[in-house]
Image (cartoon, rainbow, N blue to C red):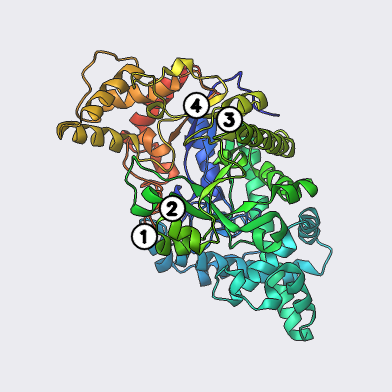
Amino acid sequence: MKLSPDKKLAGILCPVFAIRTEDDLGIGDTEGVRQMIDWCHRHGVGMLQVLPINETSDDNSPYNAISSMALDPTTIAVSPKYIPDLSAQKFKEIAKPGLLKELRAGAVKYTKVKGLKRSLLRAAFEAFLAEHWNKKTERSEAFRAFLGENGDWISDYAMFRVLMEDYHDWPTWDEWPLDRQNPKKAWSWFLSLPTKQRDEYAERILFSAYIQWIAYDQWRKVKEHGTEKKVYLMGDIPFGVNRYSSDVWGNRAIFDLAWSGGCPPEKVFKVDPFTEKWGQNWGIPLYKWEVSRERNHDWWRIRCGNIHKVFHLFRIDHVLGFFRIYSFPWPPKENGKFLPLTEEQAAKRTGGRLPLFRPQADDTPEGAKFNQKQGEELLSMVLEAAGDTAVVAEDLGVVPQYVPPVLDRLKIPGYKIPHFLREKDYSFVDGKTYPRLSLATPATHDHEPIVKMWRDLWEKADSGDDGARWDLKRWMKYCGADGEIPPREFNDHIHQLILRGVLNSNSWLAVFMITDIFGSEGRFNVPGAVSDGNWSYRLNKTVTELDKDPALLHKTQMFTKLVKVSQRLP
């Protein structure tokens, strides 16, 4: 059943890694998601949004995964309760009480968490091999069925994952031996190995596939639980993929590695010197759409089909990339070399190429028409591949004027963030005028929480920033409290006003970070920052404890009341 904009919903955004339960292994997992669905159900929240759940690399960024098909093993609930192949004895031997205590405290400690889960999954796999693999048991048949259903990606991914292990767990495939730098060569190399060594590799490859079977099985059951509770799960597909991923390794023909996608220079917000001068160079390879089109966009169709298995909706991160993308003729690792150069000097280094929009710029009618046509074609394909899974477009940034009409024709909701949408007098656009086909939110996972935003506005206003002082008043007007003096402290009153203002918008979906429901300053990501603090923040309470904490319960009940009044109950 495809969700309909006819019924407005309220939702929360809570990354899986941030969810805390009594029995987790130092990171959120499918059991935590199940409990969060129950929490949403109790409090009238109809949608639970998470960040991408694909397998990450050493930077742990969900937007820089090593596979757009494989699910991250850290999201698996790893215990005898959830994996029948894992015995209680083995769990006790590997997951020592002291280690569990360490991992469950504070933020996510990725290296140790990943190591622990992999050891436990390995123990489960070895038991599975001994008890099921060469026998016609129900579990053996189920695993073989999974391998058959996912044959178009699982074997190459599993080979890539094993080769990563051989090279310090680094996915930099272009530094591997030449006979392993693409699937065809790698499988030929595999077949040339002596029997004993080939058998060892075959078992490791099967282990990687086994992990994905467990992950997809658990996530499918979580989706079913959401359906039963009428709490719909929203996933996330990043437009771009990691250059060093199994996707690029295995599908080189559809990627243009000579260019790196990003966004144009940012002159207003002084993020860093490179961004101000040249823009953001994300390092994602461009797509060779003409080649993808010849293949009927097979890779994209598999990708959308996989996310359909585990989510009711999904968000396309940077949907503008389907239309055109700002592109650099050098990878991010060379940014430092180009920072001090003039355009003329840079062009000499690149054979005359400079950063620009591709396939075309929007500064001519012909270019804009080409980009519009391409974006509409590609998004139509995504919708077809998604089936009854609803699609939402993250269309933030400098949006070409042709994009909103395309999204409207395709019935794809775009994003509405109050303080990003301004009238000519800089006041916020009235939320009641938002199109129904939209998602309203005061902040995304990349933004500071609303309590921090409010305090920063007051700090700027106190230092003489008239723009900040006016924005405080504009927030009051947007929230239906025009003329009221903005409270200096972020108290219950202003908290309720902001929540109510977004909930009362005309948008189909009104979504809030869970930290914004609780009025906390916890932050999931600071864009552009590379630190242990990114993607590792965890809620201070377990899901069970959320309703036992009087202060948090007070905030939750306030939110539920506002959801009911705004007619967004499921």
Q: Do the residues labelled 2 and 4 touch (CB within 8 Å)?
A: no
Nearer to us of marks 2 and 1 is 1
Query: Of 191 and 294, which appears nearest the observer?
Result: 294
Of helix, strand and loop, which one carries label 2?
Answer: loop
Q: Position of residue 213 (x, y in %)?
A: 69, 57
At label 3, the amino acid type is Val
Q: Name the residue under label 2.
A: 535
Residue 312 in view here: yes
**Spatial separation of the CA atoms under disc 1 and disc 4:** 54 Å
Q: Is residue 22 left or right of residue 297?
A: left
Q: In this view, does 544 lie above or below 475?
A: below
Packing grade of label 1 (10 A; few <14, some 14-19, many >=20) is: few
Q: Check disc 3 and report the residue beneath it.
A: 403
| Lower position in the chain sequence, tag 1 or tag 3 | 1
How far is the residue under mark 4 from the one under mark 3?
33 Å
Contact between labelled residues 4 and 1, with CB atoms less than 8 Å apart: no
The answer to whether 532 appears left or right of 228 in the picture is: left
Q: Earlier in the sequence, mark 1 or mark 4?
A: 4
At x 36%, y 55%, the residue is 533
Q: Badge 2: how crowded within 10 Å, few (<14), some, or many (20+)?
A: many
Q: Name the residue under label 4.
A: 44
Q: Is mark 1 on a helix, strand or loop?
A: loop
**Mark 4 or mark 2, which is nearer the start of the sequence?**
4
Amino acid type for the residue under numbered disc 1: Pro
